[in-house]
Amino acid sequence: MATETITVKGMTCSGCVNSVTKALTAVEGVKDVNVELEGQRATVSYDEAKVTVDVLKRAVEDAGYDVE
Ligand code: 9UX
């Protein structure tokens, strides 16, 4: 299991937090997601055998937000 923190730009309300949380949770291999509006970041625990950070970032971008 790995844990990665991704900077997420463009979240402006709790609905955005829900959207990003949902998008990340839906990715196969993701075990735990914590998205912070104030911190503009998402901390994700995941199985490295199933998913990479690039895939996680793409999921956030596909949901309509920017990553660093
Ligand atoms: Mo809030 Mo975010 O009304 O995409 S859900 S700004």
Image (cartoon, grey):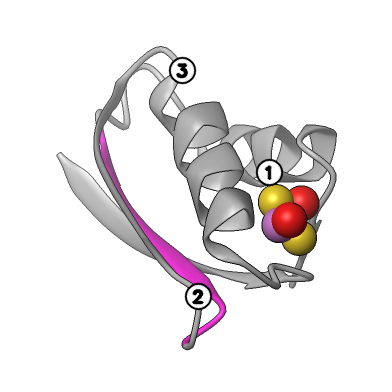
Percent x, y for residue 57?
66, 46
Element type at mark 2: loop
Q: Quadrant of residue 25?
A: top left
Q: Is residue 39 left or right of residue 47?
A: right
Any part of residue 53 in sight? no
Q: Residue at x 69, y 67 (%)?
A: 11
Name the one closer to the observer, 23 or 58.
23
Give the labeled residue for mark 3.
Answer: 26
Q: Quadrant of ligand 1?
A: bottom right
Q: Is residue 41 magenta?
A: yes
The mark nearer the N terminus, 3 or 1, is: 3
- Give the tally of numbered discs: 3
- Figure check: 46 above or below 36: above
Q: Over which residues does the magenta segment extend? A: 39-46
> Which three-letter amino acid code belongs to the residue tagged 1?
Val
Q: Kindly report the secondary structure that dominates the magenta region of the rendered protein.
A: strand
Percent x, y for residue 21?
45, 42
Q: Is residue 58 magenta?
A: no
